[in-house]
Image (spheres, rainbow, N blue to C red):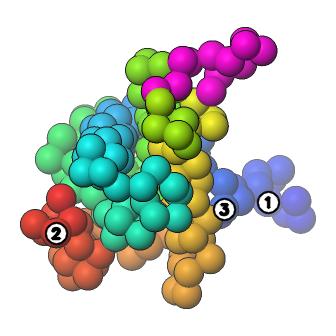
């Protein structure tokens, strides 16, 4: 770049990587995202067990208050706060990761994908459990209702009014936003 010593600022729309925040910071985030992925898949399973539609649009309405990007960042921040910041994670990097939507969402999506692969691919649109791999040998997780819903949640969140790639310090602003998003309430659990 021009006079920046060759150092480029990261694209704010891309997840932060090891070079920006360190491996320990990302490992801490991925631990929290793993718990959040379990919550997400449990919600989809519960909606399915209640006889709800397996159509992505119908599920979107039920899942959006708790699993839209902003709500995911706030819930992940709650989990990170409960875990506590490891000593090897610098405070500044922890704050940077906690508020960066693409980084939190990427960790969350990776955790959902890993869980779908572990359990054999998720549910097909007809409701049958995916077999993990199709006849072509490629993974079916990306065709599952759970994964298609996750993509829909992110796209809808990104295109919503007021969306930002970084939210205000999640731990500071989270109280009112969590309540408004229904996160951590009886309705949003």
Residue that sits furthest to the left in the current view: 186
Does the magenta run of residues contain 71? no
In front of the other: 32 or 98: 32
Q: Which residue is mark 3?
A: 13
Q: Residue at x 57, y 60 (%)?
A: 152
Residue that sits furthest to the right in the current view: 2
| Numbered disc 1: secondary structure | loop
Q: Which residue is mark 1?
A: 4
Q: Which residue is mark 2?
A: 187
Q: 117 left or right of 140?
A: left
Disc nearer the start of the sequence (2/3): 3
- Crowding near pointer 3: few (<14 within 10 Å), some, many (20+)? few
Q: Is residue 59 above or below residue 133?
A: below
Q: Which residues are magenta?
A: 129-140
Q: 16 left or right of 69?
A: right
Depth-wise, is mark 3 or mark 1 nearer the camera? 3
Q: Can I make out residue 172 in this image?
A: no
Q: Is residue 173 above or below residue 170?
A: below
| Numbered disc 2: secondary structure | loop
Residue 156 x/y as whole percent: 57, 70
């Amino acid at each position: 770049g021009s006079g920046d010593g060759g150092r480029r600022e990261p694209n704010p729309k891309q997840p932060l990587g090891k070079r920006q925040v360190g491996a320990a910071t990302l490992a801490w985030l991925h631990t929290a995202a793993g718990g959040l992925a379990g919550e997400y898949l449990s919600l989809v399973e519960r909606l399915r067990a209640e006889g709800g539609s397996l159509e992505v649009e119908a599920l979107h309405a039920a899942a959006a208050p708790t699993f839209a990007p902003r709500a995911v960042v706030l819930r992940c921040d709650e989990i990170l706060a409960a875990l506590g910041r490891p000593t090897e994670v610098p405070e500044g990097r922890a704050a940077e990761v906690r508020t960066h939507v693409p980084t939190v969402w990427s960790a969350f999506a990776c955790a959902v994908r890993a869980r779908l692969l572990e359990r054999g691919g998720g549910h097909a649109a007809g409701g049958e459990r995916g077999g993990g791999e199709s006849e072509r040998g490629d993974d079916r997780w990306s065709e599952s209702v759970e994964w298609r819903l996750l993509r829909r949640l992110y796209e809808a969140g990104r295109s919503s009014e007021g969306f930002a790639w970084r939210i205000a310090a999640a731990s500071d602003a989270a109280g009112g936003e969590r309540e408004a998003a229904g996160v951590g309430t009886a309705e949003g659990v």
